[in-house]
Amino acid sequence: MSLDELHETARRIAANVERVLVGKPDVIRIALVTLLAEGHLLVEDVPGVGKTSLAKALARSIDCTVSRIQFTPDLLPSDVTGVSIYNRQSGGFEFRPGPVFANIVVGDEINRASPKTQSALLECMEEHQVTVDTSTYHLDEPFMVIATQNPIEMEGTYALPEAQRDRFTARVSIGYPDQQAELAMVDEHAGHNPMDDLQPVSDGETVHRLIETVRGVHMAPEVRRYAVDVVSATRQVPEIRLGASPRATLHLVRAARAQAALSGRDYVVPDDLHTVAVPVLAHRLVLTTEAHAARRSATDVVRAVLHRVPVPQGSRPGANPTQK
């Protein structure tokens, strides 16, 4: 697929999602970047700003299999992955797939389930497979988990462990809309749910071709080194107790390629890394007690790292790609 076709398809998907999530083009773009980077998205924000609507609208815009899991304290791992059931007629066990066997899996309020149930997604997200009773079942491609969580109402919730957060390629916070966008939402949505009229504008085969195109986006050696330097710098900041992992480096590179492709380029520049660095890295960092006391956020630390790490010469925005 050419970059022009990719750009047009992505534009149609974004426009479709924006019919539901009004006034949040940057959030929708990160969701598309995560999809094309073969990753998973964590949507974290206060109630009522459209977390689930974003996930459902993106899923519906792509004509793929979609499932939704409402995470609750009594949810079991087998409720996610599936379970083997004894068949009296055949005299053997048959596997009944769980809701994770879909192209797009929407996990609503993931932090309301127990850590045991949360961990059922670890193998699914990383290896795109499920192991039940010593048997391994592969998930269909493309496969993407879009999980939501509420960071304010913490009663009866279980914070995602570092190993789980590290498997999410990006995290976004939708935030409140501005007054004009909220007024438009009231005019358009008060008497009618736009989700009811949302039709697919792409399909699984097209998404797979988009992903293959993104894999072919060129990244010069010095830009790859710059990505490694940025991630390595997070492990040396005194305000951070746990820096970004090598998996974070891979996710940063994949997201930068997707960002470059969405921008119409077949090569990555440092600006692409800057655009995706905060969504990709911030949720993986564990700050020290002193940093929390000083009201420093992970986003502030990532931006400080980007400001401190030198940008490679010849790869600055506007540079000729043949010079890299």
Image (cartoon, helix red, strand yellow):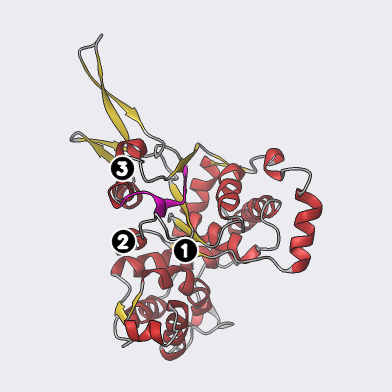
Q: Secondary structure at mark 2?
A: loop
Q: Residues within 10 Å of mark 2 (few under 14, many from 20)?
A: few
Residue 81: x and y in percent read 33, 38
Between marks 3 and 2, how big is the CA–CA gap? 21 Å
Q: Residue furthest right?
A: 187
Q: Residue at x 71, y 43 (%)?
A: 193
Residue 105 part of the magenta segment:
yes
Q: Tell me where the magenta segment starts and ends, as one range.
A: 104-114
Residue 47 part of the magenta segment:
no
Q: Which residue is mark 2?
A: 161
Q: Which residue is mark 3?
A: 129
Looking at the picture, which amino acid does disc 2 mark?
Answer: Pro
Looking at the picture, which amino acid does disc 3 mark?
Answer: Gln
Residue 221: x and y in percent read 37, 77
- Tell me which numbered mark, 3 or 1, is placed earlier along the sequence: 3
> Does the image show residue 217?
no
Q: Nearer the viewer, mark 3 or mark 2?
A: 2
> Do residues under tags 3 and 2 come within 8 Å of each other at their CB atoms?
no
Between marks 3 and 1, how big is the CA–CA gap? 29 Å
Q: Secondary structure at mark 3?
A: strand
- Tell me which numbered mark, 3 or 2, is placed earlier along the sequence: 3
Q: Residue furthest left?
A: 134
Q: Which residue is mark 1?
A: 151
Q: Residues within 10 Å of mark 3 (few under 14, many from 20)?
A: some
Looking at the picture, which amino acid does disc 1 mark?
Answer: Pro
Q: Where 132 sits versus 166, above or below?
A: above
Front residue of 215/300: it is 300
Q: Nearer the viewer, mark 3 or mark 1?
A: 1
